Image (tube, helix red, strand yellow):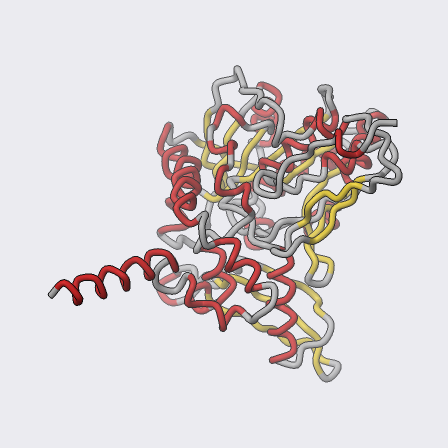
Amino acid sequence: MKRITDIHLASSDTCTGCSACASVCPTESISMKIDREGFLQPCIDTKTCIGCHRCEKICPAINAIIKNDFVSHAYNAQTSDEYALNKSSSGGAFYELSRYIIEKEGVVFGVKFDGIHVQHDYAETLEDVEAFMGSKYIQSEIGNTFKIAKSFLDQGRWVLYTGTPCQIAGFKRYLNRDYDKLIMVDLICHGVPSPGIWEKYIQRLMRRIDAGDIKDIRFRIKDIGEGGRNNFYFFFFFFLRDQQWHSYGEERMKNLFYAYFTRHLFRASCYQCPYRDMNISYADITIGDYVASVQRLERDISSTVIVHTKKGEDVVQKVSEHLGVFTPLQDIFVNAYYEEARNAEQTERNIRPYKLSNRLAMIFPLEYIRWIWMHDRFDVVLKRKIKKLWQKNIK
């Protein structure tokens, strides 16, 4: 038996938490555990590991990335289903792709809330798919969904699997083969905040407003205000108090977790994400906001649909009956996909203070550490103070 020292998984700075290593381990010696920043990291049980190195062979963080030969192109899309459009964060592209799979008696994998916990799960009806709709701005727990999805595929069923680009990369490498009935969909990803910090934040808020059981949590509620413009809430949830259901929401500019999210204090791997290039996606289709419609706060926000494979193109054309698609050429690409890439590149400047802030946020309420992001980065503030003192002494 090989010693555990022979196994070299991705470091904490490069691991994406995709869980591919834990899913492929034949002895279940790898488990995903919360680290000091609230992210899931793989942990190896030295007593049961057999040193087969399968975890190393499939890890997308330590193996060469495969680029697509297909020329990716984008669509602006919006569902014709009014109910689905109102329930979606954007234009309902995910709903229509799910409808296509469900009508083929397939299975849809997505992300849902279990209380305040965010996890991957699967649905076999459109009614159950609704739990996956809407944005969740926290990294989800994959659990054993890679294994479950593979079992459905081996049975010959259609499967739609959605996730962040790094999760889809992990799933692709876990399967290690192509399936004709598999459609993989990733997201235009801004970066993943810590699920541990999210859960501590919402628990404190629930204590403050005396909230009991949670019925539903929604990000990006489409609340129409004056002039027909959208007033986005960052999150909005329904909770039980005194045996009655109540609602609570905060607009994005007033929400502390939103401030944390937009200041790019993410998982370490997000600061060096390799999936910014359109030719590096492992998915068949990428979906996200059509940024122009979000910036204008339009009532009927549409989706960006970026096709990466011939199979993805065929599916988009087949769902076009319900998902109206049109192509503003490179406009979508520049405004949506590359905008996120530029945001990711800018976050690299914050790589020094992010660990400190994440670890502090796992201990203290966000109100106590907002100084890290509300004005300038800590290192910038410190340099400015030193410069002023220096200039003062010279004078």
How many numbered marks are there?
0
Q: Identify which residue is drawn at 51% across, 60% down.
A: 357
Q: Where on the picture, by quarter, is residue 380?
A: bottom left
Percent x, y for residue 4? 79, 34
Q: Quadrant of the C terminus?
A: bottom left
Percent x, y for residue 385? 28, 64
Q: Is residue 125 visible?
A: no
Residue at the front extreme? 394
Q: Quadrant of the N terminus?
A: top right
Q: Identify which residue is drawn at 58% across, 46% down.
A: 81
Percent x, y for residue 154? 84, 25
Q: Where on the picture, by quarter, is residue 245?
A: bottom right
Percent x, y for residue 72? 48, 23
Q: Identify which residue is drawn at 51% across, 36% down.
A: 273
Residue 319, compared with residue 134, is above or below; it is above
Residue 191, compared with residue 276, is above or below; it is below
> Of 231 and 378, which appears nearest the observer?
378
Residue at the left extreme? 395
> Of 49 and 257, which appears nearest the observer?
49
Q: Identify which residue is drawn at 67% across, 77% down.
A: 211
